[in-house]
Image (cartoon, rainbow, N blue to C red):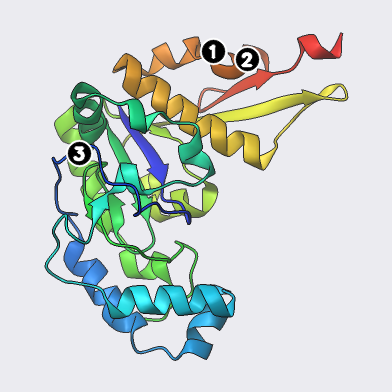
Amino acid sequence: MIILMNSSKALDFQQKAKISKYTIPELQKDADHLVKEIRKLSAKEFSKLLKTSKKLTELNMDRYANWQADVDASHAKQALLAFRGDIYSGMEVDDYKIKDFNFAQKHVRILSGLYGILRPLDLIQPFGLEMATKLATTRGKNMYDFWKTRINKNLKALLKMEKSGTLVNLCSMEYFKATKSDLLDAEVITPAFKEFRDGSHRFITLYAKQARGMMCNYIIRNQLKQVNYLKSFDVEGYQFNKKISSDKEWVFTRGEKDSD
C-alpha cells in the first residue's frame, strides 16, 4: 500500500539531517518553474496571494531569491526531516533507523504545493506555498491547474509498481483534491480520527492532524504492507470504531471511557 501525507508550513533547516542518503524530487523542474513565477511578484502581491505578514513575506521572498536550481545537501534537506508541522509532531523521525527510512521511501509520498509530490528522502529547499494558493501561471489560475494530472501520473505508476492498488489517504482535503482520486484506479482508504466529547464523536483539527502523523509513523515503524493491519492502530488511546466507519472511511475514536 501507498501512504499519502501532505507538506507542512513549519520547517526545520537548523538541525542537521541525521542521514546522508537523499534523492532529488521527481518534479524538480516544475518546482523551479514555479519559483520563477513567484519571483515576478512584488512584496505586496506576494503578501496578498499567500496571506502572509510582512515578516513572513520577507522571509519567503528571501527564500525564493536564494533558490538554487542545482540541488544538493549543502542548502537542502530531506523532506521527511524538514517538515515539522502538527502532522509531523506525531512522528518519531529523529529515532528512525535506516530500515525505517528505506520503508518510508518506498511506501510514503508527500503532497506539496511547490513540489507536487515528494518521496521522504527528496531534498527540499525552504519554501512557503500551499496547495490551495491561487497563483496564476501559464497552466492555469491555481496550483490544482498547475499540477493537473502530473501528481496522478506519478501515483498511478507507483501503485502499479507496488502492485497492491491501495492508497491510504492521510492528507488534508485541501491537498487530496490535487490527486483527482477518481482517476487513480486504486482502492482509497481514508482514516478519520475523532474525539468523544459530550456524548458524541467530534472532529478536532489539531488532534486529527497529529493522529494522521501517528498512523503514518505506526505504519513505518511496523513496516505494514496490508491495509487491514491499520485496524490494529491503538496509539494514544485511539481504537478502530467499526460502528461509525464505512468501507472507504475508517474511523478511529478515543475518549469513550472518559465519559463514564
Q: How crowded is mark 2: few (under 14 residues within 10 Å), some or many (20 or more)?
A: few
Does 140 sit above or below residue 125?
Answer: below
Quadrant placement of the C terminus: top right
Residue nearest the viewer, comparing 205 with 159: 205
Image x and y of residue 184, in percent = 32, 43
Left or right: where 220 falls relative to 11: left
* Residue beneath the point at 46% across and 25% down: 215
In the picture shown, does residue 185 fall above or below 72?
A: above
Which percent across, then down, holds residue 59? Answer: 44, 74
**Tags 2 and 3 in contact by the CB under 8 Å rule?**
no
Q: What percent of the width, then of the height, locates residue 220?
A: 33, 23
Please tell me which residue is depicted at 20% across the width and 39% down the height of the picture.
158
Gap in angstroms between the C-alphas marked 1 and 3: 28 Å
Residue bearing the label numbered 1? 234
Residue 203 position by quadrant: top right
Q: Residue at x 26, y 67 (%)?
A: 31
Residue pictured at 37% horizontal, 39% vertical: 4
Q: Residue 158 carries which label?
A: 3
Position of 195 relative to 11 (above/below): above
Q: Which of the two labelled residues, at mark 2 and mark 3, occupies the earlier sequence position?
A: 3
Task: Give me the C-alpha separation between circle 2 and circle 3.
Answer: 33 Å
Q: Residue 237 got which mark?
A: 2
Tell me which amino acid carries mark 2. Gly
- As displayed, is residue 109 above or below residue 133? above
| Badge 1 or badge 3: first in the primary sequence | 3
Q: How crowded is mark 1: few (under 14 residues within 10 Å), some or many (20 or more)?
A: some
